[in-house]
Image: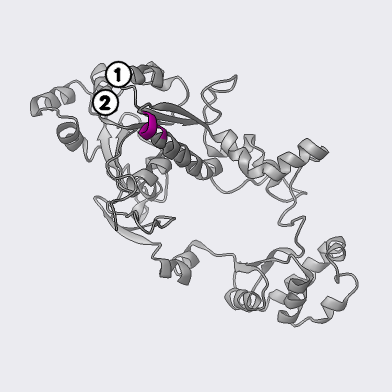
Amino acid sequence: MGARAFEGLKVADFSWVGVGPITTKYLADHGATVVRVESTTRPDVLRLLPPFKGGKPGLNRSQFFANYNTNKLSLSLNLGVPEGREVARRLVMWADVVAESFTPGTMAAWGLDYEAISKIKPDIIMISTCQQGQTGPHARFGGFGQLAAALGGYYEVTGWPDREPAGPYGAYTDFICPPFALAALVAALDYRRRTGRGQYLDLSQLECGLQFLGPALLDYAVNGRIATRAGNRDPYACPHGAFPCAGEDRWVAVAVTSDREWRALCQVLGRPEWAEDPRFATFLGRRRHEDLLEGLIGEATRSWDPFDLMAALQAAGVPAGVVQRCSDLHRDPQLKHRGHWVTLDHCEMGPTVYDGIPFRLSETPGQLERAAPCLGEHTEFVLRELLGYTDEEVAELAAAGALE
């Protein structure tokens, strides 16, 4: 095994909440030294959100924050004072990559925008991620992933046709944008390796989100059709949905894409006569009678254990999966086999379960070595060991309020 993919890379991470920290987590988990710049004067929003270990709130007790900040160092720095901004500039001089996710104009107000920092370090790579990009009439509109998902059209197409928009779970674009950001960073690093020049990366959550609605956007552009809510139904599969099973609120999802799969579904459910029913014998027939068909299937699945039904359908070649709860995921045999769940010892929360690394590099595998840091946990280490401040200088910075 060789060194990890980003071994030796130095990252000054000014980002917060979702997209930025998740992106820099990829770097940290694969060997980069990532210094997370935070402040007690305005803590990261995720530090204030549950779930909290033991149900006890605290700045260092949120596993939501912890899960996306493994292997990072935390530097507590107050950018509202000149001395704090001077430390930030020194951190930029140390770094190869600078990441930030504030509303456009915030970094410029601190003298830390790309135009300013590229003058003191021309080969710096900087990535900014915000709701709608750094330019344009809506650039300064702040917000979170729920808002970008709504602006991107997801709320219009998610939910039931006779109900209000439901939207996908959580701050959706915060979780789908980081792979784009990582790819852009890798490309910029390769460009710098070949040319010696840095560059600025401007990532819009809205524009990244649109990539996942490509078919619907193209259908409107070409045919003028506007996609809207259709529940669990799909234009290319029938039946396609989640059906009730035995137990409290237990369900199995089924997606039938061919007549062969339809006949196999009928056999497993003990209803072979459905396959011969002229109403259901073809895809178009099933689509015309979808309400009736879903009701019949739901009655047939109610007596099944969801995991038994999933196994039986999969064995018959029918795509099916249990609608799993969080507790199911922690017992999932595939995730267990892959070693997905990793327990790390957090300085305040103690041993806590973390999501593992989502992709495996055979020659340069990543690793979860350290739990997420407490706020400011590594301030003195970063100042002394990475940036070269003396004990006296660190004391002066503390007295000036720069380390809050």
Kindly identify the residue that appears in the image at 42 percent across and 41 percent down. Answer: 23
- Residue 383, position as x, y percentages in the image: 18, 31
Instruction: Give the magenta part as a residue range.
Output: 191-195
Q: Which residue is mark 2?
A: 93
Say whether disc 1 or disc 2 marks the residue closer to the N-terminus: 2
Are there few (<14), some (14-19), or many (20+) residues within 10 Å of tag 1? Answer: few
Residue 116 in sight from this viewpoint:
yes
Kindly identify the residue that appears in the image at 66 percent across and 43 percent down. Answer: 213
| Left or right: where 250 falls relative to 98 | right
Placement of the C terminus among the 4 image quadrants: top left
Q: Give residue 298's quadrant in the image.
A: bottom right
Are there few (<14), some (14-19), or many (20+) residues within 10 Å of tag 2? Answer: some
Asked if the residue under mark 2 is in contact with the one under mark 1, i.e. CB atoms within 8 Å, the reply is yes
- What's under tag 2, amino acid-wise? Met
Front in this rendered view, residue 83 or 282: 282
Seen as rendered, the residue at the extreme right is 278
- Residue 252, position as x, y percentages in the image: 64, 68
SS label for mark 1: helix
Residue 18 in sight from this viewpoint:
no
Kindly identify the residue that appears in the image at 44 percent across and 26 percent down. Answer: 200
Q: Is residue 404 above or below residue 173?
A: above
Residue 40, magenta (yes or no): no
- Measured Cα–Cα span from mark 1 to mark 2: 7 Å
Placement of the N terminus among the 4 image quadrants: bottom left
Q: Which residue is mark 1?
A: 120
